[in-house]
Amino acid sequence: MTNEYIGKNLALEAIDKNNASAIIMAPINNNPGQYWRIVQLENNVYSLHNRLFNDSYSAEIIDDEMFMKLRMAPTRNSREQHWCLFSMSNHPNQQYWNLTRITEI
């Protein structure tokens, strides 16, 4: 997954460093942390998994009251791991999506 603001040279990547997971933007490569799978849980509610962690971990938001951060955490039924996708199809050559966190269930 790339970001329109940053461009096509960096991709969303999950990393596992010293048994601590994080999600960063990194140069595009063949790293399994950059292969994402979007799993539908219910109508427009998704979980984000990747090849590095398989289905045992999902992308999760952490709100530490100063910043919201992303990490990979053990998969569970939690709103911190529930995401919505909204099409932003005003780009003629590519499909862009707005990925947002579910705030209420």
Image (cartoon, rainbow, N blue to C red):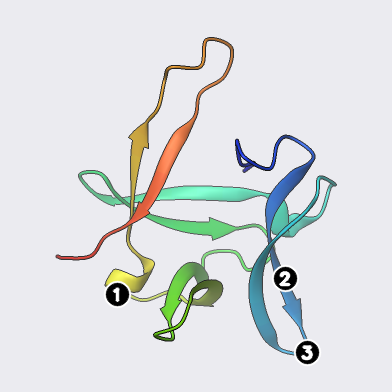
Q: What numbered label is drawn on residue 13? A: none
The single residue placed furthest to the front in the displayed view is 66
Is 28 left or right of 74, judged from the image as shown?
Answer: right
- Cα distance, mark 3 to mark 1? 25 Å
Crowding at mark 3 (Cα within 10 Å: few <14, some 14-19, many 20+): few
Say which of 83 and 89 sits in front: 89
Residue 84 spot, x, y in % from top left: 32, 48
Element at label 2: strand
The amino acid type found where label 1 is placed reads: Ser
Q: What numbered label is drawn on residue 15? A: 2
The amino acid type found where label 3 is placed reads: Asn
Crowding at mark 2 (Cα within 10 Å: few <14, some 14-19, many 20+): many
Element at label 3: loop
Residue shown at 56% from the left, 74% from the top: 71
| Marked residue nearer the N-terminal end (2 or 1) | 2
Residue 101 spot, x, y in % from top left: 34, 59
The amino acid type found where label 2 is placed reads: Ile
Q: What numbered label is drawn on residue 78? A: 1
Q: What numbered label is drawn on residue 18? A: 3
| Marked residue nearer the N-terminal end (3 or 1) | 3
Is 24 left or right of 95, judged from the image as shown?
Answer: right
